[in-house]
Image (cartoon, rainbow, N blue to C red):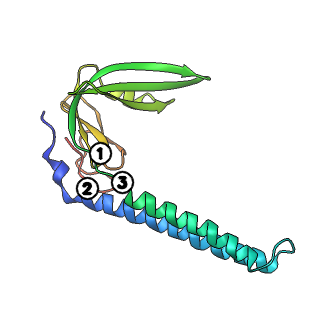
């Protein structure tokens, strides 16, 4: 089973564009709420008056706006690369199980997939399996999915039955 050519589907680009827009809108929404909230606090509070409260709201709102812009436009596309599942381990930290899958790329660099108290990814990947890292989505695709019962959406990571073709959550095609 080769890697899927569906990675070129325009649904992935739409998903990334929508994600960027949601991040921007969330930051903008928080900034508006901060400015209005501090203005109202200055109007109805005995502890602080306007314009002092409004200025504080503008500063905090401006920070939220800048964080939203940064989150929306800082998503750098990484190059694709092929690798192999090199090692798996379960760590116990403060009563929590940490499931780690190590993937080694062709240059020998190790990358980690970690999950706390959830062995799903740990069980999904097997030692020696070939994987491809899709840089624009920052996710992995297995080469051989023929024995799998589940598959993860490479856009939103929603888990599906292997028989499904499209993600129920985001509408992107499943890479199989």
The image quarter in which residue 88 lies: top left
Local crowd size for mark 3, using a 10 Å CA cut-off: few (<14), some (14–19), many (≥20): few
Residue at 69% from the left image edge and 70% from the top image edge: 56
State how far apart marks 3 and 2 are (Cα): 14 Å
Left or right of residue 131: residue 25: right
Earlier-in-chain disc, 3 versus 1? 3
- Asked if the residue under mark 2 is in contact with the one under mark 3, i.e. CB atoms within 8 Å, the reply is no
Left or right of residue 25: residue 163: left
Residue at 44% from the left image edge and 66% from the top image edge: 24
The residue beneath circle 3 is 75
The image quarter in which residue 120 lies: top left
Earlier-in-chain disc, 2 versus 1? 2
The answer to whether any part of residue 52 appears in the image is: yes
- Asked if the residue under mark 1 is in contact with the one under mark 2, i.e. CB atoms within 8 Å, the reply is yes
Earlier-in-chain disc, 3 versus 2? 2
113 over 40 or under it: above or below: above
The residue beneath circle 1 is 154
For marks 3 and 2, give the one nearer the viewer. Answer: 3
Residue at 32% from the left image edge and 44% from the top image edge: 138
Secondary structure under badge 2? helix
The residue beneath circle 2 is 12
Secondary structure under badge 3? loop
The image quarter in which residue 30 lies: bottom right
163 over 125 or under it: above or below: below
């Amino acid at each position: 089973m080769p890697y899927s050519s569906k990675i070129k589907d325009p649904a992935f680009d739409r998903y990334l564009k929508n994600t960027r827009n949601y991040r921007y809108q969330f930051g903008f929404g928080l900034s508006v709420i901060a400015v209005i909230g501090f203005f109202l606090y200055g109007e109805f509070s005995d502890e602080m008056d306007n314009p002092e409260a409004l200025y504080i709201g503008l500063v905090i709102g401006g920070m939220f706006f800048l964080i939203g812009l940064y989150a929306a436009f800082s998503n750098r596309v990484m190059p694709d690369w092929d690798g192999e599942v090199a090692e798996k381990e379960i760590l116990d930290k403060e009563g929590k199980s940490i499931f780690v899958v190590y993937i080694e790329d062709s240059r020998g660099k190790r990358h980690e997939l970690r999950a706390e108290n959830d062995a799903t990814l740990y069980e999904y990947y097997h030692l020696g399996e070939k994987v491809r890292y899709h840089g624009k989505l920052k996710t992995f695709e297995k080469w051989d999915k023929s024995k799998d019962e589940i598959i993860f959406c490479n856009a939103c990571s929603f888990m599906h039955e292997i028989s499904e073709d499209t993600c129920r959550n985001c509408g992107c095609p499943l890479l199989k």
